[in-house]
Amino acid sequence: MTEFDYSKADLPIREDISTAHQAFWQKLAKPGAWWNGAERVAIAQESRNALSCSFCKERKEALSPYTLKGEHFHSGGLPSSATDAVHRIITDQQRITRRWVEENAESDLPKGAYVELVGIVVATFSIDEFHRALDLPLETLPQPVAGEPSGYVPAVLSEDIGYVPTIPADGTVGNEADLWPAGGRAPNVLRALTLVPDALRDWRDLSSAQYLSFEGMANFVKDEHRSINRMQMELVAGRVSAINQCFY
């Protein structure tokens, strides 16, 4: 894919944001740990389809999201369980339950595949929302790169939080030594995607450009590369989180 022309925006956009976005699209197209390139791109496409899915709208308004039966607006290329997972994450994530995750894992959506899917959806949605906020067209998704998933699983995992295994705070050894500084803090929001370490790496790289790097989170004043100070950034982040009902 060709690099998106951010000069179309009415406001200037930092070069590191454009670089981070293009880097993600390139990685999206390649096989991951659980999904091949075509499936990964299909997951990204479903994150867009979910916003205009009539079944999702109906389910969102239902008292229970697990009683309705219907078919999602989809582009194909994924098992129905994966399509449903993408649409739930986009439209009704507050009502995802442990039981649903476990039942999918016992069927045809293993927890590792689910975590990789979550990582793709979160990254794609964050880039797309950046475009929507600036009234820019969404970027064309990349052409998939051939190849098979690696099947990689981290050596050290724990099941002490959430619905899926994660790397514990002191478990960043070997291939995972780069995930966060040794002996550093590892809040659950960082650990959440670590069953698929590359999913965390992708999220980390985007967050560093769009919000703050891990190191930058210790700066409570102002980053010289940002136009607003840390208090202003957190005010915006808090307001957006409240609107999106993200209570973390």
Image (cartoon, rainbow, N blue to C red):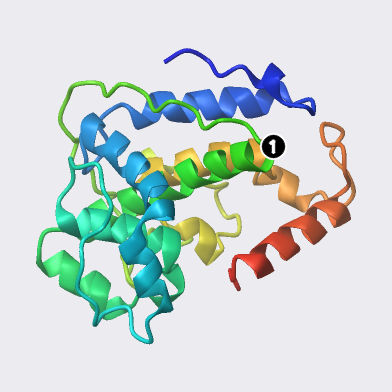
Task: Please name the amino acid that badge 1 sits on.
Answer: Leu
Percent coordinates x, y for residue 171 in the rendering: 41, 56
Q: Is residue 212 left or right of residue 222?
A: left
Determine crowd level at label 1: few under 14, some 14-19, many 20+ residues with C-alpha closer than 10 A.
Answer: few
Q: Residue at x 51, y 65 (%)?
A: 188
Q: Is residue 14 above or below residue 170?
A: above
Q: Is residue 185 left or right of residue 145?
A: right
Percent coordinates x, y for residue 248 in the rendering: 59, 71
Quarter holding the N terminus is top left
Percent coordinates x, y for residue 28 in the rendering: 36, 32
Q: Is residue 234 above or below residue 196?
A: below
Observer able to see residue 22: yes
Query: Which residue is disc 1 drawn over?
Result: 134
Q: Does dot 1 land on a helix, a strand or a loop?
A: loop
Residue 198 location, quadrant: top left
Q: Who is closer to the viewer here, 135 or 84?
A: 135
Q: Residue at x 25, y 21 (%)?
A: 145
